[in-house]
Amino acid sequence: MIGIYFSGTGNTRFCVEYLLEKIDPEAKAYSIEDKNVLEELAKEEELVLGYPVYYSNLPKILQDFLENHAPLWQGKKIYLVATMGLFSGDGTGVAARRLKKYGAQITGGLHLKMPDCIVDVKALKKSTEENRKMINQTKLKIERAASLYKQGKPTQDGLNVLCHVAGLFGQRLYFFHKTKHYTDQLKINENKCIGCGKCAGLCPMKNITLEQGKAVPNGACTMCYRCINHCPKQAITLIGKKVLQQSIIEKYI
């Protein structure tokens, strides 16, 4: 068994690694950005696939990863882990339906609530203490899920028809366009930007470049919020106009 994940601010990476630790301490997890991920994927039959949910859908970068490597999913036994700030309905179901088309067998699903990475919208922010409590509760849920998995009774979060309906009418039907394409709405305040290049180095899409000592977005953002949460000058926003409190997993564990 191996784990494969996409993670913006570390939430999904943490959850996949913690789950694997409880199921099989020898199992390793690989980001879809890892140069060895395809080689490792080809070797293994059983895996955990983790990702954050955006608008009750998959991040565009993960949609492309699944589609571009469709033959590799044939015959795989996949346990899906979806992390979310708000209820997604069928967070695991959206990946399950795609993967089944590619010949994969979905063994189960797990929904995990984690600190919201969207840090430029006030309504979504929680205190540091609230986020730490949330993660402790999530760890307990992961431990229970790992125990059930080892018993041959994997959890089935988000995989039934009712969950599909909840996800569709909860967000996806209204915001489908948000994840259909990469966005060009990333904004970088050139007055705040110091040209450190951290955002360019972290971006999974290589969407940010340095031009004349300033960071510049190039119109292909997957909305992972990684650059926004790591910018030392809080110069980057996406949905809102101001960064309220940066959020990365290391702050809460």
Image (cartoon, helix red, strand yellow):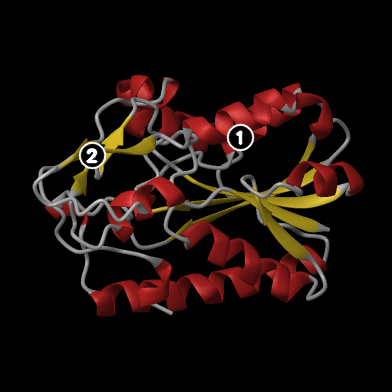
Q: Position of residue 173 (x, y in %)?
A: 36, 22
Horizontally, residue 181 falls left or right of residue 77, namely: left
Quadrant of image for the N terminus: bottom right
Q: Amino acid at mark 1?
A: Ala
* Residue ID at (26%, 35%): 186
Q: To which residue does mark 2 refer? A: 238
Quadrant of image for the C terminus: bottom left
* Residue 106 to residue 130: above or below: above
Residue 46 has which mark?
Answer: none
Camera-side residue of 72 and 107: 72
Residue 95 has which mark?
Answer: 1
Please state which of the two labelled residues, at mark 1 or mark 2, is closer to the viewer.
2
* Residue ID at (46%, 33%): 57
Camera-side residue of 154 and 138: 138
Q: Position of residue 126 (x, y in %)?
A: 22, 66
Q: Position of residue 129 (x, y in %)?
A: 27, 80
Horizontally, residue 46 falls left or right of residue 200, namely: right
Give SS at disc 1.
helix
Horizontally, residue 60 falls left or right of residue 142, namely: left
Residue 86 visible (yes or no)? no
Mark 1, Cα crowd under 10 Å, few <14 / some 14-19 / many 20+, is many
Give SS at disc 2.
loop
